[in-house]
Amino acid sequence: MEDHFGPDFITVTDEDGNDFELELVDTLEHQGVTYYAMFPAVEEDESTGEPKDVDADDEEYGLVIMKAIQEDGEELLSTLDSDEELDTVYELFMERFFQDEDEEAE
């Protein structure tokens, strides 16, 4: 049985110094690179403690894929280098997500 203690959150800072909190969904390694699949963290309604409604069509909400890179001996998260790399890694994550759903349905 798998122990699960709640979601993992990662805070990333963009080149303008803005912080974003992302919820880690999955990781995978492909051709020696570690990729992270994340969604923007959903804020809670302060009065109820329930998650606020999220508009899935909002361009600010959606799957975020980043990769781990080494810079000056430190691991950093970076955007992917090309649309081709993004498409390949996106498909790998989708295969994993649907495989997990199929296993849960059995």
Image (cartoon, helix red, strand yellow):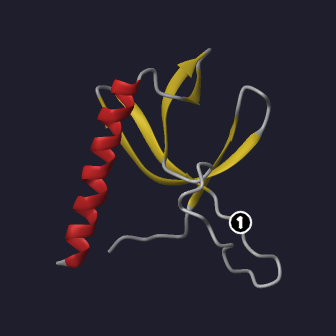
Q: Position of residue 59 (x, y in %)?
A: 59, 49
Residue 60, x across and y down, in percent: 62, 49
Residue at the extreme front of the image, as rendered: 57
Side of 75 where 91 appears, left or right: left
Name of the residue lying farthest toward the left: 106
Q: For this view, does 12 lie left or right of residue 86?
A: right
Q: Quadrant of residue 87?
A: top left
**Residue drawn 51% across and 24% down?**
69
Left or right: where 39 falls relative to 93: right
What's the residue at 74%, 80% (across, down)?
49
Q: Residue at x 82, y 83 (%)?
A: 47
Classify mark 1: helix, strand or loop.
Answer: loop
Please identify the quarter of the rendering in which residue 89 is found.
top left
Residue type at numbered disc 1: Glu
Q: Quadrant of the C terminus?
A: bottom left
Residue occupying the far right of the picture = 47
Which residue is at the front of the view, 37 or 56?
A: 56
- The quarter of the picture where the N terminus appears is bottom left
Query: Picture coordinates of residue 14 (x, y %)?
Result: 70, 32
Q: Which residue is mark 1?
A: 43
Check the image and report above or below for 27 versus 67. below
Relative to 16, is 53 above or below? Answer: below
Q: Quadrant of residue 86?
A: top left
User: Which residue is pictured at 78% across the width and 37% down the height?
Assistant: 18
Q: Is residue 34 above or below residue 104?
A: above
